[in-house]
Image (cartoon, rainbow, N blue to C red):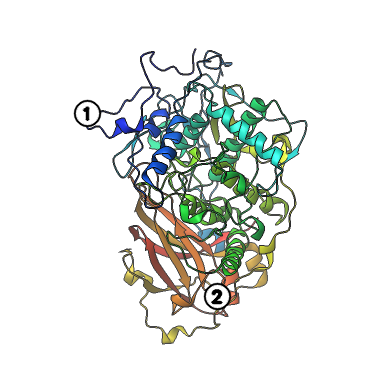
Amino acid sequence: MAFFSLPSSTHPIHPAQVRSSSLKPLIYSSSPGFFSHAFRPTRVTNHKTHAEASTCKAQNADHHQNPSTDDSISSSKSNSSKTSAGQFERRDVLLGLGGLYGATTLGTKQSSLALPVSPDISNCTDARETPNGIPINCCPPSAASYSDYTPSAREVYTRMPAHTVSHDYVKKYSSAIAKMKNLSLSDPRNFYQQANVHCVYCDEGYSQSGFPDKKLDVHSSWLFFPWHRWFLYFFERICKNLLDDDTFTLPFWQWDDSSGMQIPPMFNDSKLSLYNCIRNPKHLPPKVVDLAYKGTDSGIDPKTQIQYNCCTMYTQMITHSSAPPLFFGHPLLGGGDPDPGAGSIETEPHNNVHDWVGDPSEPNNEDMGVLYSAGRDPIFYAHHANVDRMWYIYNNVLKRKNIEDPDWLNSSFIFFNEAGRPVRVTVKDSTNLAKLGYTYPDLPLSWLDRKPKARRKGLNLTKVSAPKASEVLPIKLEKPISFVVERPKKSRSGQEKAEAEEVLKIKGIEFDKGETVVFDVFVNEDDTSKCNPCKAESLGSFHTLAHGHGKKSTTSRSFAISEVLEELGADDFDSILVILVPRRGVVTIGGVEITFVPKP
């Protein structure tokens, strides 16, 4: 059975054809993402001449018009699996921890009948609509005849920072990407077909197996880290195969260190296949990345930006990652609605870096700035390699534990291996890097000692005029709002803090997934204009990335506050002052609570 084949009469489509009002979208039942880039809207730009922009766009369109006629991979067959994806037994799950911390709703399952999540690959939704009404087809070739896969690497190789690798390495990696781009479009290893794999899993192209009315999105939940680890794993193995070099590893963009806080040189060389012209021209080197980027440049000097970035890393990796549900994200169970809630690193800096690289002159902030197209930029894989490295640091440097819930461990996904064959993998097989055959170097972490400090301690709430949260929420967040939230317990003992994290949870966050939405959260601050990421009063942001469709979603955002309240001199306060400041997009806030999350 062939994975995919285009009709013999099909010819490459030039982007100019898209602008013809007589041209209707071409949709095939098993169409590849080739057409999604072909339907890119006309690009409006103020930073390039018309000729330069046209050349750049044409070059990108050419990447999808593969001249290769070698379909040997598409005619290969995989070993059929005797087990259907997602066929797991239901079982009872004990809920509740009892005592003070038994009331928490963060990171606990909401049903006694639980299922691991798996994709229904038999029915991929071909077309998505961007906010501008542009058809997006991101269904990869058929993966119906998959086999189960368990990694068993014999050697372990080290991924290295992208800004430190040799010239020969850069040439080799560029060659691998060029080879991927030149593969037949019917080959699932083709670079843009790989981008489609990301698109279909993030853009709700698949439903959840066994639940046809529930879509699957691997973002904004506890699936985020393991899915992307597997995605990079097979992408790396495809590179190894095309290079005939088992020692090759992907580079990572070390945006958490001052030495790597610019777009790495290899991705900024227009002579290499690693280059992509669809990036924000204001953020090219030597511009320092803003790990708390909200859609507009702060205008601060590079040295200060680096300091803010280090404080952001401390907040997200140390403060807000004190328990597994806070780091990995909320549980997504079979039959559950997508977007239960993102973990600390996914929300910030992962989303911020995507947003910072994307080109705002594109209608949808492509490529990196919107999820359906992010995988088309080679820098995506270096960005996510560093995100994956944060998981490595979480385990090996911070010595924090993974989720032990069997519904997380037994969730599964389907990818294409280096031979172009579909394989099914589980989350539990992604937790051991040695079995996957790669690791990361133990580099200095300058952000470990960048704990944000209080702008001022002991804010007297009796002198602050603010209503209770119940008197304000729910509300459409159109301007900054302040409200008081009562704490379930104050002045907890050291033992109590060691057992559970106090968490501020913003609930019922409703927004359109077709938009990027950002709002900031502060605590015990009466002048947010004086705050920055290095001030403890700044808890961080709610930051989503736009998808390729406009669907309403409801989610939540959690902030660990045990350490914060100690720093602010507010550990013995009965309540805290919360301030929400809208930055981008339209969002409604449903409610707020302070709860406790058990630590392992």
Q: Which mark is residue 22?
A: 1
Circles 1 and 2, Cβ within 8 Å, touching? The answer is no
What x and y, as percent, mark residue 2? 49, 14
The mark total stands at: 2
| Distance in Å between CA atoms under marks 1 and 2 | 66 Å
Relative depth, front residue between 392 and 261? 261
Looking at the rendered structure, the kind of residue marked 1 is Ser
Q: Nearest the camera: 136 or 89?
A: 136
User: Is 228 left or right of 400, judged from the image as shown?
Assistant: left
- Residue 447: horizontal and vertical position, in percent? 66, 63
The residue closer to the viewer here, 480 or 163, is 163
> In this view of the protein, can residue 337 be seen by the observer?
no
Residue neighbourhood size for the residue with mark 2, other residues' Cα within 10 Å, grouped as few (<14), some (14–19), many (≥20): some
| Chain-order first, disc 1 or disc 2 | 1
Type of the residue with mark 2: Lys
The quadrant in which the C terminus is found is bottom right
Q: Is residue 245 left or right of residue 267?
A: right
Asked if 393 appears above or below 74 in the picture, the reply is below
Q: Residues within 10 Å of mark 1 (few under 14, many from 20)?
A: few
Mark seen at residue 469? none
For the residue labelled by badge 1, is the local secondary structure a helix, a strand or a loop? loop
Does residue 389 appear in the picture of this structure? yes
